[in-house]
Image (tube, helix red, strand yellow):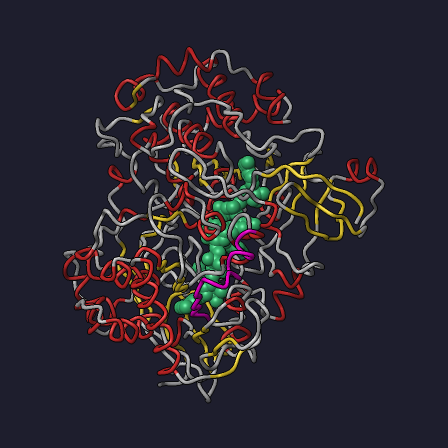
Amino acid sequence: MADGVAYSVCPHDCPSVCAVEVDRDEDGRVRRIHGARSHGYTAGVVCAKVARYAERIHHPDRLTRPLRRVGAKGEGRFEPIGWDDALDAVAEALASTAVRHGAEAVWPYFYAGTMGLVQRDGIDRLRHVMGYSRQKSTICTTLCDSGWLAGVGAFWGTDSREMADSDLIVAWGSNVVGTQVNVMTHVTRARRSRGAKLVVIDPCRNTSAEVADIHLMVRPGTDGALACAVMHVLFREGFADRAYLAAYADGAEALEAHVAERTPAWAAAITGLDEATIIDFARLYGRTKRSYIRVGYGFSRSRNGAVNVHAVSCLPAVTGAWRHRGGGALYSARSVYQLDRTLIHGLDAVDRRTRRLDMSRIGPVLAGDRRDLGEGPPVHALFIQNTNPATVAPEAGLVRCSLAREDLFVCVHEQFMTDTARFADIVLPATMFLEHDDLYQSGGHTHLQWGPKVMEPYAESRSNHDALCALAQRLGAKHPGFAMSVRAIVDATLLASGLPGLAVLEQVRWYDCAPDFATAHFLGGFGTPDGRFHFRPDWSRVGPDHAGLPALPDYHPTVERADDEHPFRLITPPARQFLNSTFSETPTSRQREGRPSAAIHPDDATALGFAEGTRVRLGNRRGSVVVPARLEPGQPRGVVVVEGIWPATDFEEGLPVNILVGADAGPPNGGAVFHDSAVWIRAA
Ligand SMILES: Nc1nc2c(c(=O)[nH]1)N[C@H]1C(S)=C(S)[C@@H](COP(=O)(O)OP(=O)(O)OC[C@H]3O[C@@H](n4cnc5c(=O)[nH]c(N)nc54)[C@H](O)[C@@H]3O)O[C@H]1N2
Ligand SMILES: Nc1nc2c(c(=O)[nH]1)N[C@H]1C(S)=C(S)[C@@H](COP(=O)(O)OP(=O)(O)OC[C@H]3O[C@@H](n4cnc5c(=O)[nH]c(N)nc54)[C@H](O)[C@@H]3O)O[C@H]1N2
Ligand code: SF4
Ligand SMILES: [Mo]
C-alpha cells in the first residue's frame, strides 16, 4: 500500500464521523491524522485524540493473537491459540448452547465501537440466520430518540452547516467542545460573520460552557421545567408565531393554557436558575429568528429524559424558527440516508418472534431477571463485538459478577484487553478502521462516506466481518452476506438503495444526502402521521412503557431524587480525551485526563469537611467507588460529577463508576439513565 496521505473516515462513536486524511511515514506507519479540508462539515478539523491515532493503532498493548482463558473468569490470564482453534471453540460453544438451551440462550452483543455499517451491524446477520436472541440497542440514543420522535416524528433537522447562518446557537445538554468538536467550527463561523451567541445548557461548567456567551447551569433532569418556563414567556410576551402554529402544529392552544401555569418562578425553584436568567434567555430565544438548537444526549440520560427532550423540541415550533435559514434544531440526521440495510443486517432472515434483550439491562439479563428473559432460557453464551459492557453498561457491579458465571461462555472480539475481554473464555484480536473497508453514515451531518482499508491488519487481527464469516461457516449459517467481501456488500447496498455504486463513491469519497431546505426544515410537514408537530404527543406510538407520561411538556419528577440518605445527584459525562471507554489506553489521553475524580461544589466540600484531593467514597445501594475530590465552583450544589468512562482498573477498588448507575429502562421505550443517580459521599 502506498506511502503518503491516505483517505478514510473516523470510525468512532461520535456524531461528527469526520472525513480524515492519514499522514503516513515511509514505512507506512501512521504519523498523524488530519480532518479533510474539502469536506463541508469536517472542514479540516478532527479532535486531538484522533489526530494522535498513531498512539492507538501502533500501541504496544494491541491484541495480536487469539487467546484462551487459563485463569479464573475475570482474572485476565490467557494463553495464545491459533485462529482455527479459537473459532472452533467459539462455534462449538454457541452450537452446544443452542442444542442444550435453545438458540435464544445465545446473545450476540454489540454496539458502536466502530460506526462502519458492515463491521458494526454484520453481527445481526449471524444472529438472525441462527435465531439467536435479538438485541434492543438502548445504551445511547433511545431516550433521546423517544423524546424527539414524540413531537417531530423524523430523524433529521436543520443542516448542521446552517449553524454558520444562525444568530443564536443553543447547545442543549451537549458538551460540544468535548464530544463533537466540529460543531464549534460552524459556531465560530457564525460568531465571526454574524456576531452569533452561543448558549450552553448544562449542569457542568465544562469546556463548552467556558467558551459560551451564556451558560445556564441547570440541575440535572430539570430541562423540562426550563423549556416550559421559556414557552410561558414566549406566549406571554408575543414571541409565539401564531400563523406558523396554526399551519404546522397540533395542540398549541392546550399548550398555551398549560404553560401559563409554568412560570419562570416555578421553573427557578426546580432548575436552580434565577427567574431573571430564565426570562432573559426566553427573550433572547424569542426575538432571534435564526435560532438553532443543537440537541445533545446529556439531558436525555435520565428517567424523565424523553419528556425533557420533547419539551425542548417544542421551542422552535412555538417561535416558528424552523421557517428561517439557520433556524430550527438538529438532534440527528440519521434518516436522511434511506439505505436498504437488508443485506448488512440479514433482515431477510429475521424471525420477529425471537425475543429481544435490552442491552442496557445486560446486568439483570445475565443475572436471570425474568422481566428481561420472559419465558425464554437464561443467556448461556455471549459473542461480543464493538463494546465494553463490563465498564460502560449500567449496574456494572451486576454485569461483572454475571460475566463471571461459570455457566456462561463469553467470546470477546477486541482491539485491546478491555475490562470485558478480561472476562472472556476466548479473546479474538480485531483490526482497526485503517485495516479494513467500511461504509459510514453520520448523525451530525448528512454525508455517506467510504472508508477504505489503507494498511494491512496488525499481527493476526481480523476484521469483524471476516471473523463473522468464518464463524458462520463453522455454524452452517447460510446467507449471501457471509460469502461476500465488504466491498461487494457495500456496492450491493448502495445499488439497492438507488445510489450510484461503490466505484463512484470511491472516486468522490462521500455523497451528501442532505434534503432540500424545505424538507430539512419540515416546511412540507413534520414526520408525524398528520404532518404536524405534536405538543401533545401520543406516547403510546413511541414505546410500550408510556403510562403516566405527561400529556403536555412538563417537569416529570421521576428521577432518582436525592434524599436524606443520598443527598447528592451524580452525573457521569464522557471525557474529552477519551471516546467512551476507548482511548483510555493511549498515553497522551491518559496523561491529559489525569485520573477519575469527583467534582464537588466547594461549599458542599466544606460542609462535608473535604479539601481538594480528599479521598472520598461515593455510594448508593448498588455499590460504592473511591476517588479523590475535586473542588469545582462551576456546578450546582448537591451535584457530583465523575467525568470519563474510566476502566475499572483505574479505580482504587477495581470497580468502575457505572456500578452506581441503575439499569432501569427509561420510559417509554427504554434507554440507559447515566446522569440520573442519587449517591451519598463520605470520607474514604
Ligand atoms: N458512566 C457513563 N457510562 C456510559 C456513558 C456515559 O456518558 N457515562 N455513555 C454511554 C454511551 S452513550 C455509549 S454509546 C456507551 C459506549 O460504550 P462502548 O460501547 O464500550 O464504546 P466504545 O468505547 O466506543 O467502544 C467499545 C469497544 O469497541 C472496540 N472496537 C472499536 N472498533 C472495533 C472493531 O472494528 N471491531 C471490534 N471487534 N471492536 C472494536 C474498542 O476497542 C472499544 O473497546 O457507553 C455508555 N456508558
Ligand atoms: N470526547 C468524547 N466525545 C464523545 C464521546 C466521548 O466519550 N468522548 N462519546 C460519544 C458518544 S457515544 C455520544 S452518545 C456523544 C454524547 O455527547 P453529548 O451529546 O455531549 O452527551 P453526554 O456526553 O451524555 O452529555 C453531555 C452533557 O450533558 C450534561 N448533562 C447531564 N445531565 C444533564 C441534564 O439533565 N440536563 C442538561 N441540560 N445537561 C445534562 C453533561 O454534564 C454533559 O456535559 O458523544 C460522543 N463523543
Ligand atoms: S472522534 Fe469524533 S470528532 Fe474525533 S475524529 Fe472521530 S468523528 Fe471526528
Ligand atoms: Mo453514545
Magenta residue check for 409: yes
Please indicate whether residue 160 sits to the left or right of residue 237 in the image: left
Evaluate whether residue 161 shows in this view.
yes
- Going by the image, does 502 lie left or right of 96? left
Quarter that holds the N terminus:
bottom left
- Is residue 684 shown left or right of residue 496? right
- Residue 247 appears left or right of 296: left
Q: Quadrant of residue 238?
A: top left
- The magenta stretch is 398-414
Coordinates of residue 267 in the picture (x, y in percent): 57, 21
The answer to which image quadrant residue 92 occupies is bottom left
Kindly give the residue lying farthest to the bottom in the view shown. Answer: 27
Q: Please state the horizontal and vertical placement of residue 284, each as a whole percent of the image.
A: 51, 27
Image position, residue 222 (x, y; %): 55, 29
Outermost residue toward the front in this view? 100
Residue that extends furthest to the right in the rendered view of this protein: 609
Of residues 523 and 550, the one nearer the viewer is 550
| Residue beneath the point at 34% across and 78% down | 88
Q: Is residue 85 magenta?
A: no
Query: Closest to the observer: 511 or 660?
Result: 660
Specify the quadrant of the image occupied by residue 345. bottom left
- Number of on-image labels: 0
- Residue 321, percent from left and from top: 37, 30
* Residue 199, visible in the rendered structure: no
